[in-house]
Amino acid sequence: MLLDNDNQRIDDNAALPAAGEMLLPVGEAALGASLAVPEDATGLVILAQSSGSGRFNPRTRRIAGLLYRGRMATLLLDLLTPAEHELDCETAQFRLNVPRLAARLMAAIDWATRDLRVGGLPLGLFAAHTAAAAAIVAAAERSAAVSAVVCCGGRLDLAGGSLWRVAAPTLLMTGENDPVLLNINRLAAHELSAIHALEIVPAAADLMSDPQALPQVALLSRVWFQRHLHAPASRHRTSAH
């Protein structure tokens, strides 16, 4: 259990309410997605997964559940098809293809801006690992649509030259006990020209697989999105490390 900014107790085991399953057409592919829209939603967060079944991961759904209870619609999106995921487990050829993942995420952003249920909501991106690099590229390319970004343990060294072009307020999170990712994210923070912060979670390595760190990841994400999901930000450099 954690305390949020309103001193309300947060049950970090609460599940995401029933979400509508769909197949999102992206070029020749159909990506699995789960959409949940609360009443009086104040924003939409796309939680992008660099896999073919990550939207069913209970850890990701716990983060989505906390966002949902913060009056945010959530779209859990798999950036690979099940067949691609199966092949990727053997070869890792798709999860590291950031341009491919980013193109699919951009297509999902375009879909969301047109959808009658969520099209009028300010939009945020949440992603981890290599999907976080795709989120950075997508935020740079869709700056008019993306209002906030959260990268959790992101391989932001794979984002190419996109970091400085991101206009949306961006939160980077990494574990204290992962020195490689910590260095990658510190370097990435220096490249960001938008409002940003780097949160280092104590005594943690892989934030998405650490049950002790996950509640903090979820809470930091919700606070960031509640603070910044409004009109897209102008380019203004403010850092917190």
Image: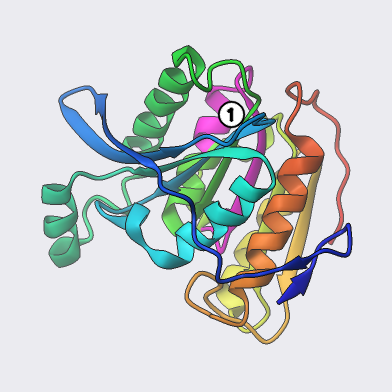
Query: Looking at the picture, which amino acid does disc 1 mark?
Result: Ala
- Start-end of magenta stretch: 137-154
Identified at 63% across, 22% down, the residue is: 121
Task: Estimate how packed mark 1 is, as few (under 14), some (14 to 19) or many (20 or more) residues with alpha carbons within 10 Å.
Answer: many
Residue pictured at 41% horizontal, 35% vertical: 102
Asked if residue 120 can be seen in this view, the reply is yes
Which corner quadrant holds the C terminus? bottom right
Q: Is residue 124 left or right of residue 17?
A: right
What secondary structure is marked by label 1? helix
Within the image, what quadrant is residue 169 found in?
A: top right
Q: Which residue is mark 1?
A: 140
38 displayed left or right of 108:
right
Colouring: rainbow
Q: Position of residue 53 (x, y in %)?
A: 27, 55
At horizontal 24% and vertical 50% (from top left) the residue drawn is 94
**Residue 77: image location, x then y, percent:** 38, 42
